[in-house]
Image (cartoon, grey):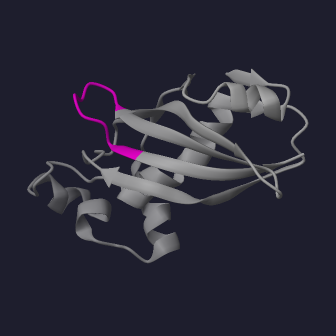
């Protein structure tokens, strides 16, 4: 885990690789719960028997499930002491490149692209590349924006 003690340290790290999260296995239960939460019950996500004969050979995680995992991945990759609040500010450029089959292991590799001070706090942009164990191409690449307040 990359640890910072001040806004100045974060700013100075712009352009640096932050590290990787631990590997996590995507389960059918996670996918089913996400389907329930989002009302997206498409068979490629929730019907293992039908999905075997489908284009991916198994059920796959929702792309937005993989994207939603960025919060958990971030908490494993970066820690900033003294921050009283961090909020999601949005996303820039998001691409879903490879489907994540249920049972696959994924992790995020993160790079701090920018750290921009402002009146409200420090805005950071972190590029996450969500890798799939054993796959040449990542599941997704997204630039995640956050505002940090001291």
**Where does the image place residue 48, in percent across and percent down from the top left?**
25, 56
**Residue ranking furthest to the bottom:** 39
**Residue 51 in the image: above or below residue 114:** below
Residue 7, quarter of picture? top right
- 94 left or right of 83? left
Which residues are the magenta region?
132-141
User: 28 or 123: nearer the eye?
Assistant: 123
Is residue 71 a member of the stretch shown in magenta?
no
Is residue 136 a member of the stretch shown in magenta?
yes
Q: Residue at x 52, y 71 (%)?
A: 37
Q: Residue at x 11, y 58 (%)?
A: 54
* Residue 46 appears in the rendering: yes
**Where does the image place residue 89, in percent across and percent down from the top left?**
64, 60
Q: Quadrant of the C terminus?
A: top right
**Residue 82 in the image: above or below residue 93:** above
In this rendering, the count of numbered labels is: 0
Q: Quadrant of the N terminus?
A: top right
- 62 left or right of 2? left
**Where does the image place residue 25, in percent across and percent down from the top left?**
44, 36
**Where does the image place residue 53, in percent across and percent down from the top left?**
8, 56
Residue 19, quarter of picture? top right
- 89 left or right of 69? right
* Residue 29 appears in the rendering: no
**Residue 97 in the image: above or below residue 2:** below
Q: Residue at x 50, y 62 (%)?
A: 33
Magenta stretch prevailing secondary structure = loop
Q: Residue at x 77, y 53 (%)?
A: 118
């Amino acid at each position: 885990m990359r640890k910072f003690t001040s806004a100045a340290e974060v700013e100075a790290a712009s352009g640096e690789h932050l590290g990787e999260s631990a590997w996590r296995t995507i389960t059918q239960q996670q996918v089913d719960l996400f389907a329930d939460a989002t009302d997206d019950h498409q068979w490629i996500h929730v019907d293992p028997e039908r999905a075997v004969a489908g284009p991916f050979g198994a059920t796959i995680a929702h792309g937005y499930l993989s994207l939603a995992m960025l919060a958990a991945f971030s908490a494993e990759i970066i820690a900033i002491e003294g921050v009283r609040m961090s909020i999601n500010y949005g996303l820039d450029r998001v691409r879903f490149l490879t489907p994540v089959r249920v049972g696959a292991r994924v992790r995020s590799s993160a790079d701090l692209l920018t750290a921009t001070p402002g009146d409200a706090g420090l805005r950071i942009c972190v590029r996450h590349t969500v890798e799939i164990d054993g796959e040449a191409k990542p599941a997704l690449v997204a630039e995640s924006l956050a505002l940090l307040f001291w």
